[in-house]
Amino acid sequence: MTTRAKRVTPITMGVALTATALLALAGCGSSAKGDGTSSSSSSKSLASAASAAPACLPATLKISARLPGSSVDVSPAPGSVTANPGTQISFLGLPAARIHVISVTGARSGGHVGRLEPYSQGDGASFVPDKPFQAGERVEVRATIGAAAGSTGGKDYHYGFRVDTPYSTTAVGEFPNPTAPPADYQSFDTLPGVQAPVLTVTVPDRDPGAGDVFTTNGPGPGRYGALIYTPQGRLVWFDQMAGGITADDLSVQSYEGQRDLTFWQGRVLSLGFGQGADVVMNSSYQTVATVRGGNGLAADLHDFQIAADGVAYITAYNPIDCDLSSAGGARDDVILDAAMQEIDMRTGLVRWEWHSLDHVGVMESETSPPTGSAWDWFHLNSIDPEPDGNILISARNMWAAYQIQGGTGQILWRLGGLDSSFAMGPGTRTAWQHDARLLPDGEITLFDDGSDPTEPFEDHHSRAIRIALDLANHRASLVSALIHPNPPLLAASQGNMQTLADGNTVVGYGGVPEISEYASSGELLFDAHLPYDLIFYRGFRYPWTGRPLTPPAVVANANNTSLETIVHMSWNGATGVASWRVLAGPRASSLQPQTTIASTGFESQTILPETFAYVAVEALDSGGHVLATSRSVKVESFASAFPRAGRSR
């Protein structure tokens, strides 16, 4: 084990916190001994707490979700101390007909009746209790596993778990969202109120096959939302959020045989995690699935991975009251337990759940309990499900990645951190890293934020690294490290590394909103950035074809002489629009073609050399075929057009 001094945790989302945002979180709720004792089941605020919180640090970390002598994995796992009061009881590994729940009893809440609801995949079921459990209590489960319905021969199991004491985040502030300066964004006549960040391309694209640029803006300055750009920096799609909702982690994944957009949307708390839901949209930008967290937890922003047969993996954060005096904190404190959930996308049931506190010691953290805020000791930020069922995760505040055994949840090995399973070769150690991925050849990729204040100043830069593992001899070797040239970039938080099919690498620098593509030789093939006072979580490149179901947008007004007609047109999310045909006339029912113009950007415009009462536009592909037609709109006066886009002219 490597011993180092603890770090002060840097702000995890790269945005300064207000005093209000820093004021909150303290406590946790399960007995380490599993004796059923706990404090009140109600959540409380740190400022008002006056007594010790329940014990929540487990007495042992050798917890397995596998029922002995069976192929069934259960969650909450036997002996675990992190179950939320709203938890289901999941049985994964056998058809529902061979799972028989005899009794579920809380030490305080008493017996629970409920429904055994099968997973759509046919390999298990969740017992959904009729009422929540009480915080701090021990729950006993009795079940018979293996016997077919109406027959004998199954095996009886009796196990227990402890319920934690949730800390309410109701009073916890969100990240500040100041207005971005006008130079940071572009606005449009056809989309009033939309302010899309400008993407500046600094190295022209030399790999057009990599596709478009996918990213998000926020949390931080400017309007939040999901963004697609061409590699030339032209906006393709902006799904602008409203009411403080943030979008993060825009990607393309396969769902039910289609290539769909996926992203998270919700609120980002000042504590550095999100509470929301994961969204799947088709190429027409219609929502085809929404994945929410289960067991009383909300889906977090950090990762959303779709696996085969309608299974999704999500991150979730579980703030709990906890006595942290044994870890250098307060007796009445709060810890952020990081959770990973395997969700049945068709039913919303939680098939399996894993908690950091049940498996990793808090003293392995590179951070210490802060004063006046929750301890984000682990900070789960990526999930990588593997074909063999195992799962690779990254924990930012551990400076480590973990290989988790599928089903049992036990840790197979650690890469980096204070208790690495490998001898770490030169250049393999990371600081505050993100986005651990296992490649088909067994190598690991990571985005190393690298903001280690103990290292020499000249070493302060972020890297996209590839590591080879010698599992037999327990050695880790650096294969390659990509560092942004001129200048090297240092991301205080966030970031990702995407390995393309041809071996090229796309790097998103997170807290520094830069996206770059490198050849396998390290040559920079593409480079672009949002305004540097903005923030994105990850950046990707994918080929994309979008065809919205909504029609193109068009607005028109007379010019200042009232003798000509100015026409603006756009189609948010559409690809393949080569030109626009402008129709105009005295009535909406009698429009005639007036001109055809090239599509010159997200929004195109033209001027017709006479006045008309109504206009419409047709979006044309490169062959001149009509892709879609806008509705007919009335031509406005010149004066009425001034406030339309919320800007002066």
Image (spheres, helix red, strand yellow):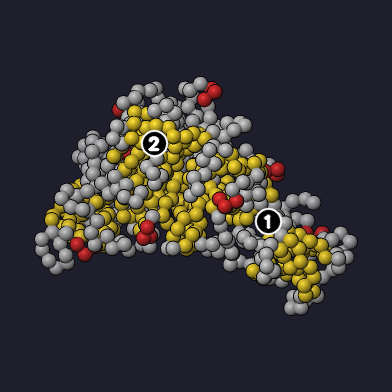
* Residue 477 screen position, x and y as percent: 39, 32
Q: Nearer the viewer, residue 35 or 592?
A: 592
* Residue 102 screen position, x and y as percent: 17, 58
Q: Nearer the viewer, mark 2 or mark 1?
A: 2
Q: Nearer the viewer, residue 146 or 574?
A: 574
Does the image show residue 319?
Answer: no
- Mark closest to the chain's N terminus, 2 or 1: 2
Q: Which residue is mark 1?
A: 602
Amino acid type, label 1: Phe
Mark 2 and 1 residues: CB-CB less than 8 Å, in contact?
no
Q: Which residue is mark 2?
A: 468
Q: Residue furthest front?
A: 521
Secondary element under disc 2, as helix, strand or loop, is strand
Secondary element under disc 1, as helix, strand or loop, is loop
* Residue 359 screen position, x and y as percent: 29, 39
Q: Is residue 454 above or below residue 229?
A: above
Question: How many C-alpha atoms fall within 10 Å of the one at disc 2: few (<14), some, or many (≥20)?
Answer: some
Left-right relation of 146 to 84: left
Amino acid type, label 2: Ala
Residue 372 lies in quadrant: top left
Residue occupying the point 49% across, 30% down: 450
Q: Please state, as top left, top right, bottom left or bottom right, where the N terminus lies in the image.
A: top left
